[in-house]
Image (cartoon, coloured by chain):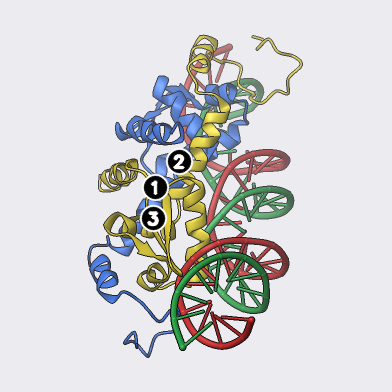
Chain colours: A yellow, B blue, C red, D green
Amino acid sequence: MEHGHGEEVERCECTHVHEEVVKDVTAHMPDDEKIYDLADFFKVFGDSTRIKILYVLLCSEMCVCDLAETLHMTQSAISHQLRVLKQMALVKNRREGKTIYYSLSDSHISTILNQGLEHIEE
Amino acid sequence: MEHGHGEEVERCECTHVHEEVVKDVTAHMPDDEKIYDLADFFKVFGDSTRIKILYVLLCSEMCVCDLAETLHMTQSAISHQLRVLKQMALVKNRREGKTIYYSLSDSHISTILNQGLEHIEE
DNA sequence: TGAACATATGAGTAATTGTTCATATGTTCA
DNA sequence: TGAACATATGAACAATTACTCATATGTTCA
């Protein structure tokens, strides 16, 4: 049983592909670009330092310095991670003199964190 | 103004820590272990191959071979990722002869994916 | 203006991770 | 039983990533 695309590299050796299902599912998949964006989005949640930062900001707006103190990490490490969170539009900041205060910029965040918690708690 | 823990390494040079806020927030943080589990959970969603697999399975139960065909990837690569998804209890499988069918094992998954989509679509 | 402070950032490094390749495990059927 | 098939897995490698260190940017205040 041929797969019908001789010009492509053969990826799968199985001879019994269920072609209808494959076609059907393929038709209902989100665009590749959207998939990559989604993965990048969740990647941001896939680091404990960033999760901690989000939980802190869920509780209170905070400056970089206090975040570092709270999480027992260097100012630089926190600053780097805040940059990642900001790029993904999860946090925003405002300046007050020398100090820069960060806060959550999206209301989905607690929902997403809670869904995650529900899962890992079975 | 001392921070009051001389035995610890000094992580933050700022001299103006807002101690009350730090204390308050610290008291309301989830356990470290839970934070790590959460990060590990979201890490699983932070890869486009795994996201694709989840979207496929959201649509239909499927064998490893068909997944590889659908996503244009090797059987081995898919199998490795299915292992990760299974360890996180996101997918389950059943055997039927030589074939092993995978399907979603958790109803939160579509909710979580949708929350992510909502965010990246602004 | 210049010193002190709060934050940001680039380069370097160690650790993690996704894929490939080769091969092992487990099932069916002649 | 042994050949063919479907899936799983370990080792190796390339790419990514989180942190550190040094330093740059930007603000305040004397």
Q: Against A79, is D15 above or below?
A: above
Residue A71 visible somewhere in the drawing:
yes
User: How many neighbours does mark 2 have within 10 angstroms: few (below 14), some (14-19), or many (20 or more)?
Assistant: many
Q: Which mark is residue B106?
A: none
Residue placed under numbered mark 1 in the picture:
B41
Q: Nearer the viewer, residue C26 or A95?
A: A95
Identify the subunit bearing mark 3.
A
Q: Residue at x 41, y 51 (%)?
A: A91
Q: Against A7, is D20 above or below?
A: below
Q: Against A97, is B113 above or below?
A: above
Picture quarter containing residue A59? bottom left
Q: Amino acid at mark 1?
A: Phe
User: How many neighbours does mark 3 have within 10 angstroms: few (below 14), some (14-19), or many (20 or more)?
Assistant: many
Identify the subunit bearing mark 1.
B
Q: Amino acid at mark 3?
A: Ile
Badges 1 and 2: C-beta atoms under 8 Å apart? yes
On screen, residue B101 versus residue D17, left or right, reads left
Quadrant for the N terminus of chain A, please: top right
On screen, residue B68 versus residue D23, left or right, reads left
Give the CA distance from mark 3 to mark 1.
11 Å
Q: Residue at x 49, y 12 (%)?
A: A24
Residue placed under numbered mark 3 in the picture:
A51
On screen, residue D22 versus residue B56, left or right, reads right
Q: Residue A102: horizontal and vertical position, in percent? A: 40, 58
Q: Nearer the viewer, residue B15 or B108?
A: B15
- On the same chain, marks 1 and 2? The answer is yes
